[in-house]
Image (spheres, coloured by chain):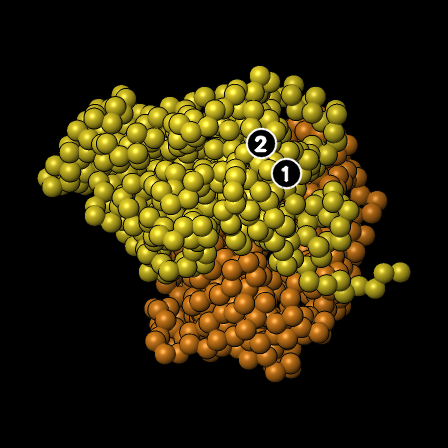
Chain colours: A yellow, B orange
Amino acid sequence: MMYDFIIVGAGITGAMIARTLSKYDVSVLVLEKENDVGNHATLANSAIIHSGHDPKHGTLKARFCVEGNRLYDTLEKELKIPLLRSGGLLLSRNAAEVDTLKAIYENAKLNNVPGMKLLEKQALKAKEPNISKTVIMGLDLPTTKITYPWEVALKAMENAINNGVFFAKNTEVFAMAKTENGFDITTNNGVFKSKQIINAAGAFAGKVAAMVENHVPYEVKPRRGEYLVLDRRVKGFLNHTLYPVPNNKGKGTLIVPQVHGNILIGPTNTPQSSLYATPNDVDALSSIKENADKLMTDIPYHQVIRTFAGVRASIDHEDFYIDYSREVDGFMHVAGIDSPGLTAAPAIAEYVVNSLIKSKTTLDPKPNFNPNEPECTMYHALNTAEKKAAFATNKRYGKIICKCERITEGDLMQHITRTLGADTIKGMKKRARVGSGLCQGGYCEHETIKVLAKASNKDQTEIDYYDKDTPVLLKETKVKL
Amino acid sequence: MKKHDIVIIGGGAGGLAAAQGASAPHLDVLLLEKDARLGGILNQCIHTGFGLQHYKEELTGPEYAQRAIRELEGLPITIKTNTTVIAIEKTTDFTITYTNESEGETTIRATACILTTGSFERTRGAIKLPGTRPKGIITAGSAQRYLNIDGYLVGKNIFILGSGDIGLIMARRLTLEGAQVLGVAEILPHASGLTRNIVQCLHDYDIPLYLSHTVTDIRGAGQLRGITISEVDANFQKKPHTEKHFEVDTLMLSVGLIPDITAFNGLSFAKDNRTNGALVNQTFETSLEGLFAAGNALHIHDLVDDVSAESLLAGKHAKAYLENKNQKAASHIDVLVDEHINYCLPQRIQCTQDTDPITFSLRVKAKHEKATLKIMQGDKVLMTRKRQHLAPAEMERITFKNVDRLDDQTPLSLKLEVS
């Protein structure tokens, strides 16, 4: 079969492009080398839907950030993704920082960021009581929001699939060859043919592009970001997303309330050579604390439950690189999607489809396109009547698997049987938050393994943690009678 | 809404003893356990060493649990297993919401409540280990559960961080099961576990113990490939050029237990940030009237025998609370400790006519060959006891009998005089 489009990569960008293309009468296949959607940059980031104050006016980043921020309100309704309207505060602590803050304010006005206000110390303190005494002026960014990035990518891809897009996970692209009317794409799962290719491979975009281009117009420069995660029981300590005034090293250390009540502190910004490995570094973690203490007092660090690191898919250009190849007809780059990539993703998808693709290909709308996905509410979030009704149909909602996050066996089943169901422990954690709490899986991992094994008719030793060959249980020791 | 006199949350060693202590023919006592069976963590502790004090006999964990379960036979106690408490609030009574597969979410009321929810294990995130985050890093208790309850081995080449008792026990257990345990690293200059476990689980199997060492790197993407340990100085900073590398598929953490009182966030009671548990008086009542705590949910114990003894008392006091509910609240004095003592329980004493002896449980901060423990009120020395071989890993107890001689205005203080 000859596809109209093959998208390489099912991160937030690839998933959004797939969904936007699914509105049209074209055949689309998404290839993902991992065993799940959103396993790299989409997995490990600040989860912020930025207002668009930061990117330089005139860049794609500025344009898509403001537009993407607005589009998330629609996505919330259609895909039923969680959005926390935290608002943001950009904080300055001395005269030089106030000057930078005012310059950002001017830039943000050009970017058409709505609802901004400069705030003095008292007003800031009223909004955020635990703010540091050294803060003197702030910029109120009311459109700043927080989401749950994995769920956004999953829901976007599920919606694309439900509207006819094909999705192949565990499928890594090894080679691409230009043919007379398209491309042959060789993978570990065979050769696929497509008229056009959209390269949304994130940090791997350079590698993918080099399979067809002699001179890739950018170079991927991965940069690591590390974070501390505070338990959800700190909820209420912080209401807004706090930004320091940026310096030449990027946005700096942010303090971010999360949709489930946790607080994220980070990221760092460290260049690294590997596209994969994301080791945490002890010095980086102490620098996070040092920086965060400049913005807030009495941060409850004793509630840290986890540290993590992610890799930004940065390139050697300041802006996103989104364009058709100048060398190879029908090959499109969607590269350099670092911050504000999560925010920009829906706007990037609109631009890719409506501006770039439509400039050379006629797209006919699909009459039966359904933009909506069902609600995937956790049992604990239902009201009493809804809980009763759910329990009446499935007794497994009565059994708690993850005590820390109040996740029931019924919730797990819902996330196993959804369009893109979980088949690994990590996949389950991304979807249902099981193991995301204080005990980090100590209470619930063995239960999760049993539920996954039973649902897939597998032995418990066949249930992987991450990808293949990462089972938690190595071998059975008891002799079966 | 169903009303009970006493609800006990958690049916491990603590909950079983608390239920036994609280039970009376005229009282409605309900015991809630999240697991399918009673006994809690005892069920996965298939080694011996339990019960020497409480049952005057050496038992395995499951045997000990069975003894404790049998003691409840014939007592008017309602037990619900497979039942998890998800919320608890207090107005005049306690409102407890639990869930299970037969009733769904159910809310009940109780006059008194005993927390015997045990503890959870400190994880990698809480100690901020550097390096990658592959699969293969597991807490010792989880590995123990997989091996002894579910019957699965988690790895073949194993390194253990932390010399807590569960880690030591697992070093032996995994060795017997055919795995290679390459070593145990402890960041402190002394072991955290009981001396008998160091001898019987490490020395007897030639497993090296690296004191003043910690994990300074973790390698591997999806699967753990190796770790590096380094020696640390007195401030726990790594000393350069002291790295030792190990190729392992499993890093097992035995880095401490934390009282699990997370289900009780809806309640406001005073906590002790040294124990991470509640602050209690000698009746094991917290600062919230009618709320009692005991066992590892209160503070971490070395021996289950102590958990049983303490929880039995907590149960008895909860029963007494029900019986004397209309008595006016008594005044309290605080129990203070000096710089050599990490913490002491109870943290405060209720001044009543009751002259029952009070047993203080305390942990010292550092090892001492010899020391003198004093109970004082102001400048007045009320009691003096000489002690030998004190260590942070071994809980000390001192029983104070002359409760009627206490002055109800002055805090009590525990002092450790070290030579």
Q: Mark 2 points at which residue?
A: A27
For mark 1, name the chain.
A
Q: Residue A43: x percent and y percent?
A: 48, 44
Please name whichever residue, A219 or B262, is drawn nearer the observer in this view of the structure. A219
Please name whichever residue, B411 or A438, is drawn nearer the observer in this view of the structure. A438
Residue A146 relative to residue B298: left or right: left
- For the question of whether residue A217 can be seen, the reply is yes
Q: Name the residue under label 1.
A: A1
For label 2, the SS is loop
What residue is rendered at 65% in x and 77% in y? Answer: B200
Q: Residue A302: x percent and y percent?
A: 41, 50
- Residue A333, labelled with which disc? none
- The three-letter code of the residue at mark 1 reads Met
- For the question of whether residue A225 can be seen, the reply is no
What residue is rendered at 22% in x and 32% in y? Answer: A57
Q: Which is more foreground, mark 2 or mark 1?
A: 1
Please name whichever residue, A290 or A87, is drawn nearer the observer in this view of the structure. A87
Residue closest to the far top? A367
